[in-house]
Image: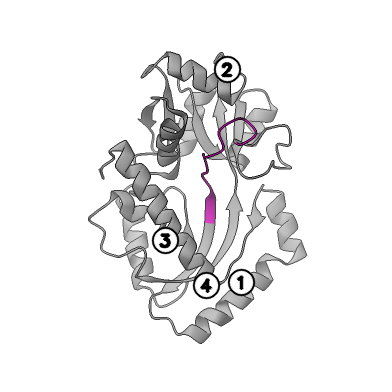
Amino acid sequence: MACTGAGARRLAEQAAAARSPVPARRRNGHPRPSYRGAVDSELNYDPAKDFAPISLVATVPNVMVTHPSVPARTLQEFIALAKSKPGGMNFGSGGNGTSNHLAGELFNIVAGVKLVHVPYKGVNLAMNDVLSGEVHLVVIGIPAAAPHIKAGKLRALALIAPQRSSALPEVPTVAEAGLPNFEVTTWYGMLAPAGTPGPIVTRLNAELVKIMHAPELKERLAAMATEPRTSTPEEFAAYIKQEIAKWAEVVRRAGLKAD
């Protein structure tokens, strides 16, 4: 998946060449080794080979939101409405190749609809136009959307997560809403440059797992609808490869190209 702008590419390239561990975030404007290469064939690094995975760190559930004026109170009603207007409804994103862009394209594929992509310079700008009723759908993290959902300014159609969130307990998961094969997770992880000695990776992994599951940190993360999710280096490496394959297939089926 392509990054948002040249700055994000440079940051990821610097991370690949760095001498110390760097964070990876599957979101706009940050190094995203899981799907960056799926869209952009001109990268100066290999997302799978130029990093040594240390561990997953945390995940943040995404939520599908629309404006209350849209005549669809459930996800199935929204899908039916979109199918009745092929090309007549849209979804917003933080820009071409961002995670919410690919989430929208995956929704088109899984739900069998044809929402038109409207890119913005940041997903919060896309959400602002959902708030104004100009855009019909955006996939966004719970922390950004929850205040507007609770205030009645946005309607939550479904949570893209395996289980409901305590931050929005009344919002059904996509599986509960009738779309079980739609999965888009925002995840954070820690990577080191390729070639980092194994004992160092093992030590970093152990310390990171200990930190992420400390009760005081878990409490702070829960307040931001963020859940600790750690792994072994091997599990993280396998997960990255799985994500690359998944999003490469979405890019192929949607016919996307790098900017």
Identify the magenta region.
Answer: 175-187
Residue 132 can be seen in this image: no
Query: What is the three-letter code of the residue carrying label 1?
Result: Leu
Residue at mark 3 to residue at mark 1: CA–CA distance: 21 Å
Residue at mark 1 to residue at mark 4: CA–CA distance: 11 Å
Mark carried by residue 112: none
Dots 2 and 3: beta carbons under 8 Å? Answer: no
Residue in front for this viewpoint, 110 or 225? 110
Who's the residue at 70% across and 42% down the image?
Answer: 165
Dots 4 and 3: beta carbons under 8 Å? Answer: no
* Mark closer to the chain start, 3 or 1: 1
Query: What is the three-letter code of the residue carrying label 4?
Result: Pro
Residue underneath mark 1? 208
Residue in front for this viewpoint, 89 or 255? 255
Who's the residue at 59% across and 53% down the image?
Answer: 59
Q: Is residue 228 above or below residue 72?
A: below
Dots 2 and 4: beta carbons under 8 Å? Answer: no
Locate residue 253: give its quadrant.
top left
Query: What is the three-letter code of the residue carrying label 2?
Result: Ala
Query: What is the three-letter code of the residue carrying label 3?
Result: Lys
Locate residue 146: give its quadrant.
top right
* Mark closer to the chain start, 4 or 3: 4
Tell me residue 175's x, y (percent). Answer: 61, 36
Residue underneath mark 4? 233
Mark carried by residue 72: 2
Mark carried by residue 241: 3
